[in-house]
Amino acid sequence: MKNRTGIEYARSKYNEYVVREETTLLEFIIKAMDGISRNRAKDILAGHGVTVDRRNTTRYDEPLRPGQVVCISKHKRSNQLLNQYVRIVYEDKDLVVIEKREGILSMPATAKQYSAKQVLDEYFAKRHFKCTAHTVHRLDRETSGLMMYAKNLETAQILEDNWHEIVYDRRYVAVVSGSLEREGGTIESWLKDNKAYITYSSPTDPGGGKFAITHYHTLKTTPRYSLVELKLETGRKNQIRVHMQDIGHPVVGDRKYGNGSDPIGRLALHAYRLDFYHPRTGEPMNFETPFPREFMRLFNAPAPSTEQASEDETTEVGSNN
């Protein structure tokens, strides 16, 4: 009776599959679960949600042969991160990709400041992981979107030393004031902070400035607002915000570089796409989030799929946007 109860319990928690042909575990999971993404399949593995012949495994390249039994958990881990500001999108032994909400720092400037790094460190400690979150790039407190943290010093160093080679596509979407005169274009200038820590833009190097290039593409426009997608060749501090101010169409909700327009009660800047080569395996990793609903309400239309969107900004290690 106890055995039967155990079997019934296992069936309630796991889907059971029999291997019919030689393959690898990752490919088997993708096929068994109706073509889920490779990243989602890896996330299930990293969360200890898979067994092979009753043996738990996290090896995505584990070879399978006909007759073996693979069980895949039906449920999310009970110790998953539950936080109003941070959602884990992907995690493995080397790194974690999160979606950060507006209103929280990427990393604290002082020990008392609440940050996404602190949220992750507490999450790791709760799971008894001997690691901490290493910050390899940042988003401003009021900017939302995708971020990556390393889980060990080796991975952090690889990312810091090879950021531009590893991260090959980061894209942002913003709502800016007014109707853009052009469908798209490129903004180039030198950026430098003044003594009040305000970043200003100059057509020539003011001395100690950093050259910045921003590409933008208009997705939707009304007389009052435009939805713009952005890609930076150079990820400088506050680059998007300053460059949109330069062309007379500042990001709405921007208290520092805006014109006072704040229709949704937040900075309308979101990092929606993050593509990179895994620093250990070299495998392409691709992540996207939907455009924020509050952005799209300004255009009285449902958000377009992320497949329809175009490009974002590549932020240098340690820079803010």
Image: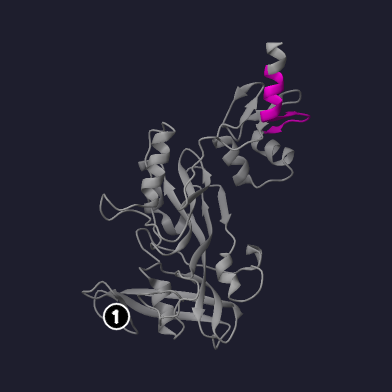
- Give percent across and percent down for residue 259: 40, 82
**Local secondary structure at mark 1:** loop
- Give percent across and percent down for residue 224: 54, 84
Q: What residue type is labelled 1?
A: Asp
Relative placement, left or right, of 94 versus 56 is left
Residue 157 visible in the displayed image: no
Please state, as top left, top right, bottom left or bottom right, where the C terminus lies in the image.
bottom left
Pointer 1: what residue? 205
- Give percent across and percent down for residue 67: 76, 23
* Above or below for 52 versus 270: above
* Above or below for 62 versus 282: above
| Depth check, front residue: 13 or 98 | 13
Residue drawn at (68%, 46%) of the image: 36
Residue drawn at (72%, 15%) of the image: 4
Residue 55 lies in quadrant: top right
Range of residues picked out in magenta: 6-24
| Depth check, front residue: 254 or 66 | 254
- Which residue appears farthest toward the right when viewing the image? 20
- Which residue appears farthest toward the top when viewing the image? 1
Q: Is 13 contained in the magenta span?
A: yes
| Depth check, front residue: 160 or 194 | 194
Relative placement, left or right, of 180 versus 104 is right
* Above or below for 320 versus 156: below
Please state, as top left, top right, bottom left or bottom right, where the N terminus lies in the image.
top right
